[in-house]
Image: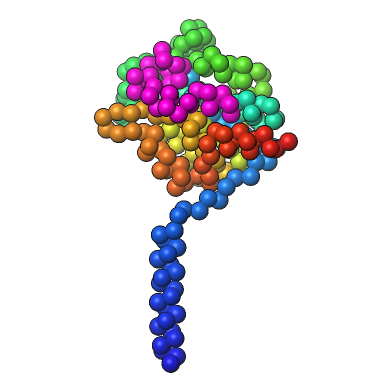
Amino acid sequence: MKVKMTLITTILAIVALTDSANAQLPDPGVEIVASRTALLITDPQNDFLSPKGVTWGVVGKSVTDNNTVENIDALFSAAKANGIPVFVSPHYYYPTDHGWKFEGALEKLMHNIGMFDRKGALTTEGFEGSGADWLEQYKKYINDGATVVSSPHKIYGPETNDLVLQLRKRGIEKVILGGMSANLCTESHMRELMEQGFEVAVVSDATAAAIVEEGNGYESALINFRFIANTVWTTDEAVQKINSVN
């Protein structure tokens, strides 16, 4: 009888483990705390988000379908209205960066098409209205003297800039993340921030990505957002949560 009960217990335990493995992924969530939560936007720049940008031919459909430009605007607006600190992690290439001896596939493409190019690290000559400049409608948020603009990341993630330092120096522990592009800089920022011990909520329709013959970068990113981030929100959900802070 004891052996039979042990066998039954074992079988029930195996069934429970199998059910758990097959269950829907949990949603740990992120609770917004005004003093410890920031909005982070990656690459809100013309080369990604303007029809005149050098990548519009491959990202334009995704940006348009997701209403990405307006959704990022809504996040900026809500954060500013509710005292949530705003951070921007930009992507710039200077002439010396074109001296790199090797690149990954997308790095090589970005360098070839002059994406995010600036005249130099210590000059803004030619910056206004260039592909590296902010989308015009975001300038009222970014250039207000309060938004923290980190040093540029050079490939995709914040490992090469001072974003994490800037967040920690302001006591930030939780990040609401949007921007461009989904499967590259946005996803890379999500991954590194998670590794650095931040809570991350990704806003799924405040981003977009290239659609090329090899695949749809946005669809790829959605899977990893869900698997890795603490939670994934729509813009409407994020704005509602930010507005409920006060």
For image coordinates 40% across by 77% down, the residue present is 11
> Magenta part mainly helix, strand or loop?
helix
Task: Give yes or no for residue 52 being in the magenta stretch.
Answer: yes
Q: Nearer the viewer, residue 125 or 4?
A: 4
Q: Nearer the viewer, residue 160 or 184?
A: 184
Q: Which residues are magenta?
A: 46-75
Q: Residue furthest top?
A: 125
Tell me if 160 is positioned left or right of 104 in this view. Answer: right
Tell me if 242 is positioned left or right of 17 in this view. Answer: right
Task: Give yes or no for residue 81 being in the magenta stretch.
Answer: no
Residue 167 in view here: no
Screen quadrant of the C terminus: top right
For image coordinates 46% across by 45% down, the residue present is 226
Residue 236 falls in which quadrant of the image?
Answer: top right
Residue 56, how many percent across, how many down? 38, 19
Residue 25, how many percent across, how many down? 46, 53
Q: Residue furthest right?
A: 246
Q: Residue furthest left?
A: 213
